[in-house]
Image (cartoon, rainbow, N blue to C red):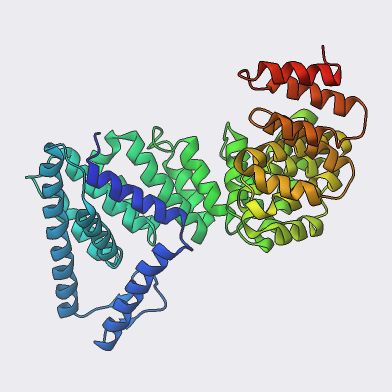
Amino acid sequence: MKFSIALAILILLVAGLFGISNQQQLTTVRERHAKLAAAAAQLGISIDPSNPNDPIRSTKRERENKQASAQLVANEFIAFAKEMEAFEKKGKQPDEAQQKRMMDLMDRMMSLDTSQLKFLITAVQAAKDLKDETRQNLVAFSILTLANDHPLAALTLFTESPDLHKDNRMGSYIVSSSLSQWAKQDPTSALEWVKNNSAKFPDLITDDVKTGLISGTATQDPKLAFKLIGELGLKDANSSISEIIEAATTPDERTATLTALREHLAGITDEKTRAELSDRAISDFNNDLIKSGFAASTQWIAKSNFTPAELDSFAGGLYNLKGDENGQWIQWVGEKLSPEKADDKVRDLVRTWTQNDYQAAGKWLSNAADGPTKNSAISSYAETVSKYEPATAAQWALTLPPGKDRDKTLRRISQNWPKEDAAGKAAFKQQHGIK
């Protein structure tokens, strides 16, 4: 199925919202939704706390008003799609005003309840003047909108829309998103749905879809999420474990996930497999943890009582550090890792930092405490800057204690010396006895 420009953007926007539910964009939409609910309450439309999926007890008149509102959104939705069909036919890209209309439509759709979205989907399916692919995309987008708050309803609508089953990519995305959201609310029921429907939709309920279920489950019960890896028969355990770890975004959630991970690994009898899974899993904690800053990260690590192997794995995943925290992490690596592991990782971190901001790296190096960590950092810094400032690199290399490390660094500087300065390279080699 070919995706139109505008509809692809709309679907990506919704996909983004699924993954950033605590961030400002979704917060803004939900705030608008809450205002609509408050306005409805002032009009005498009450909330039924016993059935959150069907929030409004409405009179016949209220139901008619809701249907009219849904019809209005459906009309605008369909009209916008027609405009985009014509626009795309001319080979143009959506401008800023059209992108704003996309956002406004998405906002309004998210304010619709289940019955209204079902009405909208019916209206779209009946719009015969749309291209088949456009109609299918609109229905898919509507179901995705519903999936965020009413995943079971979204799955039901999807199974009742056979046209969508033709595109496994879109179908899998809808099912995966719906199951992930549902598992956050009720993992047991979501799992039961998968078991009951796997035979009906074998091409749609793939390992990726099952991984979405595991990811959603992890937000509530990481121990159950790890159990599901085996229960669902997933072939790629690494991918599933990464999803479970990435679902933990607070210190308490990370602690619960780490505890569940250690229990899961303890049940793996093959030592090599267990070690490989552990290495990958522990390094995955970096993806979100380091965003909380050096102090918070290292406090959590200390409370978690990492083993030496876990510390090595965690340090191995240290990348994309904040500029002003590079020095702190380098010093931490030098203190916490075994000498050999520390040397390799310090060199790696200093190399990356120097390539990104050699002045900041050099300033930190000037003030760093003497010792093995600083020596590894000096060697890496000198080798990195030698490609464009060989004289500076040589000065740093000569601050290393005499011995193999200094000699090795000097040879690397010679190898990296700019080709256009052959005379300078020759003088340098002669000065330091490099053949």
Residue 421, horizontal then vertical, whole percent = 65, 20
Q: For the point 68% across and 33% down, which residue is it?
A: 385
Front residue of 380 and 202: 380
Front residue of 256 and 348: 348
Front residue of 173 and 418: 418
Q: Is residue 37 above or below residue 220?
A: below
Residue 271, horizontal then vertical, whole percent = 80, 31
The quarter of the picture where residue 67 lies is bottom left
Q: Is residue 330 left or right of residue 139?
A: right
Residue 268 visible at all: no
Q: Is residue 336 left or right of residue 142?
A: right
Q: Is residue 425 above or below residue 103?
A: above
Q: Quadrant of the N terminus?
A: top left
Q: For the point 74% across and 25% down, which residue is it?
A: 413
Residue 28 visible at all: yes
Residue 100, horizontal then vertical, whole percent = 24, 59
